[in-house]
Image (cartoon, grey):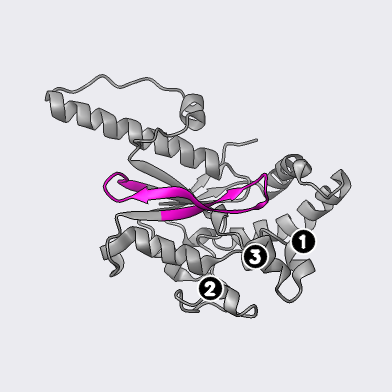
Amino acid sequence: KNYHGIMAGKSTSSLLLSNLLQLQIEQNKEEEQSGLQTKTTAVTASELSTSSPSSGSTVLVMPMDGYHLPLSTLQSMPSSKELIYKRGSPETFDPISLLRDLKRIRGSDCGHVNESVVHIPGFDHAQGDPQPNAYTFRRDQHTFVICEGLYLLHEDDNSGKDADVDMDADADAPTGWNEDIRKQFDLTIFINADVDTCIERLKVRNKCIPGYTPEEIDIRCDVVDRANAMLVLKSKDRAMHIVDSVVA
């Protein structure tokens, strides 16, 4: 499954769905063991969207943020200053590694060996860089994987690069955002939201980014993040389902 949409509540929705799935799985298990229909547990949306999954959860939430290119990689690339300023745009991610890990998780479903464990990177916001092995997919534990991110449905004009090639080896290599990533998901959901509302929320959230004045943050949101949002909207029709965000 995947979630898509800029500042539209992707992470919150993914956590909510993860907890809903886990609750249903546990209820089904109780019914199978007892042979009786159990009483539905009343849980608020607030509780579902703020409770972290337990270590034994059968649902794994996998953020796309872990596939940001490291700052050191961006610094070594042509137009590094521009890329660093545009960090968060499609060309500043590593979709090749994302596709590789998605295929490893799917395993035999796409012709790969069923690895028992697949380590997945996260993003350390304190360091401002990807964090290796932040999440772990365990085949004998995780029944569902929810992947959330902006560009999971995005396809660029230079796609088609082989996923086994090291992106760092060629700074001018195409980014590799293509339909192969989308095809790894059994269900895709696009969270549709008003761009102006999302940009205003982003201006508030990004005030914590070091090295920029509040005015510079506002400009960057209006220039860089708005362009990203408009790009994301172009991929909306590739989703199996489109739902409206309820965030305000």
Query: Above or below — where is 83 with respect to 116?
Result: below
CA distance for labels 1 and 3: 10 Å
Question: Closest to the observer: 227 or 88?
Answer: 88
Q: Which quadrant would residue 66 be assigned to in this image?
A: bottom right
First in sequence, mark 2 or 1: give its number.
Answer: 1
Q: Is residue 7 above or below residue 76?
A: above
In the image, taking residue 146 as reference, residue 9 lies left or right, namely right
- On residue 176, which mark appears? 2
Gap in angstroms between the C-alphas marked 2 and 3: 11 Å
Left or right, residue 39 beside residue 74? left
Residue in the picture at 53% in, 48% down: 191
Q: Earlier in the sequence, mark 1 or mark 3?
A: 1
Give the quarter of the figure containing the C terminus: top right
Point out the stretch of residues depicted in magenta.
Answer: 119-144
Q: On residue 16, which mark appears?
A: none
- Where is residue 115? Give x, y as percent: 30, 59
Query: Which quadrant of the figure has residue 220?
Result: bottom right
Q: Residue at x 30, y 46 (%)?
A: 143
Residue 126 visible to an observer of this rendering: yes
Name the residue tied to disc 1: 85
Tell me where residue 91 appears, x and y as whole percent.
Answer: 64, 68
How far separated are the C-alphas under marks 2 and 1? 21 Å
Of mark 2 and mark 3, the one earlier in the sequence is: 3
Front-most of 80 and 21?
80
Q: According to the image, label 3 marks what residue? A: 92
Magenta segment: does it hold 173? no
Question: Dominant secondary structure of the magenta stretch?
Answer: strand
| Residue type at the position of mark 3 | Thr
